[in-house]
Amino acid sequence: MCGIVGYVGHRDCSDVLVSALTRLEYRGYDSAGIAVFENDKINVAKSKGKLKDLVEKMKIEGKPDGFAGIGHTRWATHGEPSDINSHPHSGAKVTLVHNGIIENYKELKEFLENQGREFLSDTDTEVVAQLLDYYYSHINDPIRSIIETTQELKGSFALGIVFEDFPNKVFAVRRESPLIIGVGEDENFIASDVPAIIQYTKNYYLLEHDEIAVLSKNEGVRVFDSHYQIVSKELKTADWDVDAVGKCGYPHYMIKEINEQPTAIKNTVLPRIKDGMPCLDECNINPEVLRNIRNIYIVACGSAMHSGMVGKYVIEDIARTAVTVDIASEFRYRNPIIGKGDLIIIVSQSGETADSLAAMRLAKEKGAKTLAIVNAMGSTIAREADMLIYTHAGPEISVASTKAYMVQLSVMYLFAFELAFAKGQIDEEKYKYYTSKLLETPEMVEKVIAQTTEISQKISTKLLTADSLLYIGRGLDYALSMEGSLKLKEISYIHSESYAAGELKHGTISLITKDMPVIAVATQSALYEKTVSNIKEVKARGAKVIMICQEGNDVPKDIADYVLKIPNFEEILLPMLVCVPLQLIAYYTSVQKGNDVDQPRNLAKSVTVE
Ligand code: AGP
């Protein structure tokens, strides 16, 4: 969602802000703006649309020229995308950018209007700017007025702030919404995420809730708590470089990230293997903890939730422990029956998804143990969970998740194997066997990428004219096809649903018309014949069938228009292989439709508001 950046240093500030915002484009946005000190005046440029529109506008109207300032990409929540609603917003002496949602903005606006203040935009952010300006006009101390203001705010916020009276200083504060402080040589930064600043520095501080940072070129960075006390911070260093956030010759981030999957799996799985078996001790997970688990809930959103669907089938099958998978936005409001002895697994690439975070906090309140499976280091979910397994996918820039989903799957397996062994459901031989197979997956995924790219491309040309399609499967294939369907929808804009194949006859089969594409996943031997029967049913009603099965499967004549074969492998692990052609089909469909693959319309990478 919205992206925030800020800079003080020796470089051309406008250029730094635009370049840093470009690295946050993946978060999704519909307008952009910057505010830069020109000597001691704050000069604002903002525009509806993409960063290139802002750059064009600045070419015509002039680019703010200076060495300190703040910038923003906005994903509209309060008020349509427009020049006026774009950030920065200002009061008399204060200009700021905001990520998050202010829940009590109406009451605050009413109060400020009663004080004679006027508003230009429909945003909740302008209310914050005016409120801060109101306090500043009374207190005249920037930090104290930030403290007073944030005490009044309900909701989530990360703010980048400049005060006209403090040229060449940038202030920042956050609650719930993410914000980091980048530390360079005679230059400092604020940003919603590390990729924004990685080309300038790898060193950063994580700002905690309600902490206030003051950045300047010569005095460095000072951080205060909400009692105006100096806080000393631990300097962190990103362990990846600028290539990780570039396209490296690929036309889109999505295809780059699909190709990075073998490495991502290795980075995630290898450090967790000891003597041929998973060892999650460093994540505070050990056999005793596992043996005491009563029920498991996997709670997440989107693709992360889909990885949990695969996890459910695997954990229940081999560890014989009940697993409920929940959509975080449902879980948090349905008064779930959870408590001591239950384990809630929260899965999240960004570690900042508002609903997943709220679900985790609710689970804690109710006495359950929480385990987070998170990709973004130091994110809020990672910091607040009782137990934590980091996935090591590296930065995922494409809005459509691929490598993050893949490594979430790999962690589901690590966890399931360890749980099954701890609970005595599998013996050491089986435990080591499963682990050895998991260790083979990077090589297998690489092979599948090579083998299925061409056919996936061909299949995608057949989907271009479809209005709608179905993904069907049973068991693990059904769990996986949910992700295939989401991938296609989000980037190709073609409607699709994933359906349990056995459920078709109970209503959905009425949708099948001549040439409607049906992607049928049939990789599980025990269910193969059953799925084949379901495929015959849709074929008989005119569907164009794309069947995905294992090499060597006996595919009855005339049931499929295309057959995409996956190498034989340990069946429980096949979702990690089969997700590759599903990703590729979605990718090539989107490319051929001329869509914005990496930044699909209306979507944001990290959904930090409800
Ligand atoms: C996946 O392609 C989506 N962009 C989306 O469903 C995503 O997985 C979801 O919003 C959850 O995000 P998180 O993993 O950062 O919590």
Image (cartoon, helix red, strand yellow):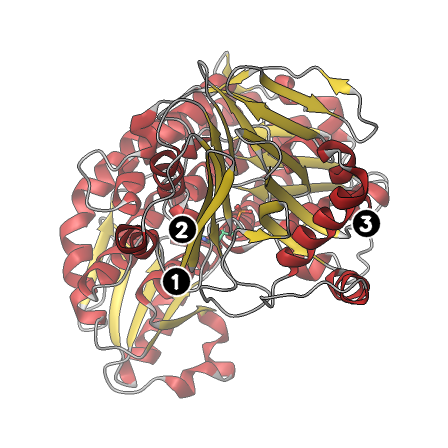
Name above or below for residue 176 compared with residue 388: below
Q: Earlier in the sequence, mark 3 or mark 1?
A: 3
Q: Earlier in the sequence, mark 1 or mark 2?
A: 2
Residue 385 position by quadrant: top right
In this view, which residue lies farthest toward the front? Answer: 40
Q: Residue drawn at (39%, 71%), measured in percent from left and top?
A: 496
Residue 23 position by quadrant: top left
| Local secondary structure at mark 2 | loop
Find the distance from the CA under tag 3 to the CA under tag 1.
38 Å
Q: Residue drawn at (72%, 47%), measured in percent from left and top?
A: 132
Q: Nearer the viewer, mark 3 or mark 2?
A: 3
- The residue that disc 3 covers is 152
Find the distance from the CA under tag 3 to the CA under tag 2.
34 Å
Q: Is residue 472 left or right of residue 287?
A: left
Task: Classify mark 1 as within 8 Å of ligand 1 or not, answering yes or no.
Answer: yes
Q: Is residue 138 left or right of residue 96?
A: right
Q: Nearer the viewer, residue 133 or 31?
A: 133
Label 1: how many Cα within 10 Å (few below 14, some 14–19, many 20+): many
- The residue that disc 2 covers is 399
Q: How many marks?
A: 3
> CB of mark 3 within 8 Å of CB of mark 1?
no
- The residue that disc 1 covers is 490
Specify the label residue 440 is tagged with. none
On the image, the x and y values in percent for residue 266 come to 38, 25
| Local secondary structure at mark 1 | helix
Task: Classify mark 2 as within 8 Å of ligand 1 or not, answering yes or no.
Answer: yes
Q: Residue drawn at (38%, 64%), measured in percent from left and top?
A: 601
The amino acid sitting under disc 3 is Glu
> CB of mark 1 within 8 Å of CB of mark 2?
yes
> CB of mark 3 within 8 Å of CB of mark 2?
no
Name above or below for residue 555 compared with residue 508: above
Find the distance from the CA under tag 1 to the CA under tag 2.
9 Å
